[in-house]
Image (cartoon, rainbow, N blue to C red):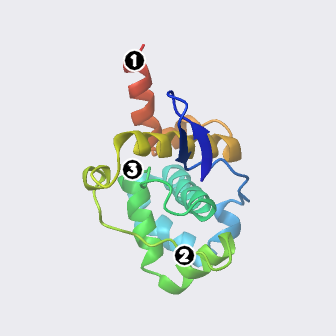
Amino acid sequence: MSRRLDRAGRRTRSRDVRTDVPSPSYRNLVPQHLVDRVFSKFSKHGKPTVSTALEEVVRFLQLGAAAPSSVFFPGDRLMDDIWHALITETAEYRELCSKIRPGFFLDHSGITFEDYLRTKPATEVHEEQVSWLASYVHNYGPIGADSYRHLLLAQALSRRMKATR
């Protein structure tokens, strides 16, 4: 947690996930037979789409390892389905998480975003989201069009920014 001042000059604590994250591709982290299984299971989406979604799942895990419990899952249904497919291969998923950071394991929860919003103040959730996106861009560069279509968080913040203009 970092310390900063709010508008009234009071000290506040905020999560700042902007950190350097080792960022090897899924190609270097996920065993090939598991990659093949993911591509086969989601073949109706096409290989380029599945490849991008799998890459985004691994990036989510990498950022999650750097700042556990820092943000609600930012992805679309395909990313979530791929995450489920990885998790059901528990031993390989545990190995993947450990490759990202020794001892790391990111649990999956069925909580909805609406329920998540009830667990903390809206300003804290917004701050988490902005911080996660800053960390994403810091580590992986600008969000490309292929990735953007999977990152619901980026889409939602983009809509909010346009609405405030």
Residue beneath the point at 53% across and 86% down: 91
The answer for how far apart the CA atoms under marks 2 and 1 are is 38 Å
Residue beneath the point at 42% across and 13% down: 165
Label of residue 105 in the image: 2
Question: Is residue 152 among the parts visible in the rendering?
Answer: no
Q: Tell me: residue 71, above or below residue 130.
A: below
N-terminal-most mark, 2 or 3? 3
Coordinates of residue 11 in the picture (x, y in percent): 56, 41
Judged from the image, the secondary structure of the residue bearing numbered disc 3 is: loop
Label of residue 60 in the image: none
Which of the two discs, 2 and 3, sits closer to the camera? Answer: 2
Q: 10 Å neighbourhood of mark 3: few (<14), some, or many (≥20)?
A: some
Q: Are marks 2 and 1 in contact (CB under 8 Å)?
A: no
* Relative side of 65 to 43, left or right: right
Q: Give 66 or 94, whichever is nearer the viewer.
A: 66
Q: Amino acid at mark 3?
A: Asp
Question: Is residue 122 among the parts visible in the rendering?
Answer: yes
Label of residue 76 in the image: 3
The answer for how far apart the CA atoms under marks 1 and 3 are is 24 Å
Residue beneath the point at 49% across and 56% down: 50
* Relative side of 59 to 45, left or right: right
N-terminal-most mark, 1 or 3? 3
Q: Tell me: residue 33, above or below residue 123.
A: below
The answer for how far apart the CA atoms under marks 2 and 3 are is 21 Å
Within the image, what quadrant is residue 3 found in?
Answer: top right
Residue of label 1: 164
Coordinates of residue 152 in the picture (x, y in percent): 41, 43
Q: 10 Å neighbourhood of mark 2: few (<14), some, or many (≥20)?
A: some
Residue beneath the point at 56% across and 61% down: 64
Q: Amino acid at mark 2?
A: Phe
N-terminal-most mark, 2 or 1? 2
